[in-house]
Image (cartoon, helix red, strand yellow):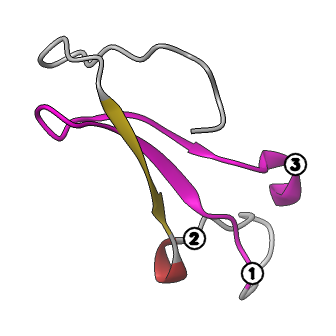
Amino acid sequence: MNEQKQYVCPWCGGKDVVEGIQSTYAKVQPNKALTLKGENLIHVICKNCGTVVRSYVENPQVLE
């Protein structure tokens, strides 16, 4: 992961997480225009129970 933040799962309290990327048809796109481009949605997932702890777009400035 690119951040050094310590994540704690709100469901099970686990601290062991993995990062996954949701891409292709699930990319986040600007609301004001239809485009084939978009940004990947990144999920931080608890390895103990599978809960998505955090979801974010890596480069939100591209959506402006």
Q: Residue at x 19, y 11 (%)?
A: 13
Q: Which residue is mark 3?
A: 61
Q: Residues under labels 3 and 2: Cα distance?
A: 15 Å
Residue 64 is marked as none
The x and y percentages for residue 12 are 12, 17
> Could you tell me if the residues under marks 2 and 1 are in contact, i.e. CB atoms within 8 Å?
yes
Which badge, 2 or 1, is on the more N-terminal residue? Answer: 2
Q: Which residue is at the front of the view, 58 or 47?
A: 47
Say what amino acid the circle numbered 3 marks: Gln
Which badge, 1 or 3, is on the more N-terminal residue? Answer: 1
Q: Residues under labels 1 and 3: Cα distance?
A: 14 Å
| Res 34 → quadrant | bottom right
Position above or below: 11 against 32: above
Magenta span of residues: 37-64
The x and y percentages for residue 55 are 48, 41
Query: What is the crowding at mark 2: few (fewer than 14 residues within 10 Å), some, or many (at least 20)?
Result: some
> Could you tell me if the residues under marks 3 and 2 are in contact, i.e. CB atoms within 8 Å?
no
Q: Which residue is at the front of the view, 50 or 41?
A: 50
Residue 35 drawn in magenta: no
Residue 37 is marked as 1
Task: Give the structural element (helix, strand or loop) at label 1.
Answer: loop
Residue 27 is marked as 2
Position above or below: 27 against 63: below
